[in-house]
Image: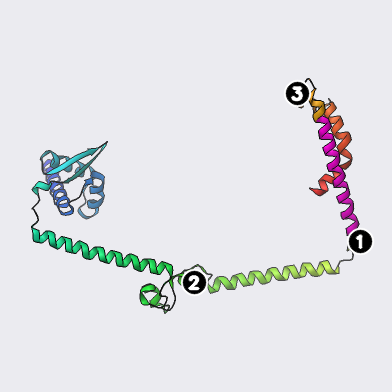
Amino acid sequence: MSKGRDGAGAGGGAAAVLLRYLREQNRPYSAQDAFSNLQREHGLGKAAVVKALEQLAQQGRIREKAYGKQKIYFADQEQLPAASDAELRGLDAQIAALSGQVQALQQSCRQMEAGERPGSPSAVPAAARGHGLSGASLPELKDLSSSMTTSEMAKEIKELKRDCESYTEKLERMKSATNHVTPEEKEKVCSEQKLYCREWRRRKRMATELLDAILEGYPKSKKQFFVSPRSGLCGAGAVLSSTVLSPLCSCRRRSG
């Protein structure tokens, strides 16, 4: 029996907390939102929140509205005290003042992002002013933040010096070698390669044109025409291709 009374008391407490919260905030909440906002401060469980909201809605103390499968709950506006004209004028003045502050802050943010007024205190964050960087603009601070630190630069310099030493040693070994290729030999090899590659392209074009002409009247498929010699069935296309192109295949491999 005591457990039942405790449960009822907990449910009544949850209902009171939710009713006061909805009236103070005066905006719609789903059961999940209300649970997320109140669980840490009041220790309410989700099941208790859902049950209390449904109970308050059934009692007519709050309003309930369904959007598809989700329900939202909000305070009954008729039960809230009506604001006087003076209170409404005060709220309007407060809204106007806050709107002006928002516009000023937005303008300040735009100036900081654009880097305007680099020496003015408003263009520099408080953290930067605390580190003696009040004369720097926001773009400069961003560049400094994205730059390497002193220790990182020292490490990078050390690695670059090690690479330079390795390349210098490799260059010295190449200079001291005795099997150098003379410019005349290099020019001769390059000229021969160009000649063979040009001849290979010419023969390839001739073979392609010839094979296309044959395939126009060939009764079987192109795959059957080009039977690989590895299968033991040396087709006409394979024979023709190997006859025309094989003498210069080495040139193609060197040029590739």
Q: Nearer the viewer, mark 2 or mark 1?
A: 1
Query: Image height check: is 166 above or below 200?
Result: below
Point out the image quarter for the N terminus. top left
Query: Image height check: is 174 above or below 255?
Result: below
Q: How far apart, in angstroms, are the residues tagged by discs 2 and 3?
A: 68 Å
Camera-side residue of 250 and 110: 110
Q: Nearer the viewer, mark 2 or mark 3?
A: 3
Q: Secondary structure at mark 1?
A: helix
How dense is the environment of label 2, judged by Cα within 10 Å: few (below 14), some, or many (20 and up)? few
Query: Which residue is tagged 3?
Result: 221
Left/right placement of residue 76 relative to residue 173 reads left
The numbered disc on residue 144 is 2
Viewer can see residue 3: no
Q: Position of residue 84 (x, y in %)?
A: 8, 57
The numbered disc on residue 184 is 1
Look at label 2 and name its amino acid: Leu
How dense is the environment of label 1, judged by Cα within 10 Å: few (below 14), some, or many (20 and up)? few
Q: Position of residue 147 (x, y in %)?
A: 52, 69
Q: Which range is magenta?
A: 185-211
Q: Earlier in the sequence, mark 2 or mark 3?
A: 2
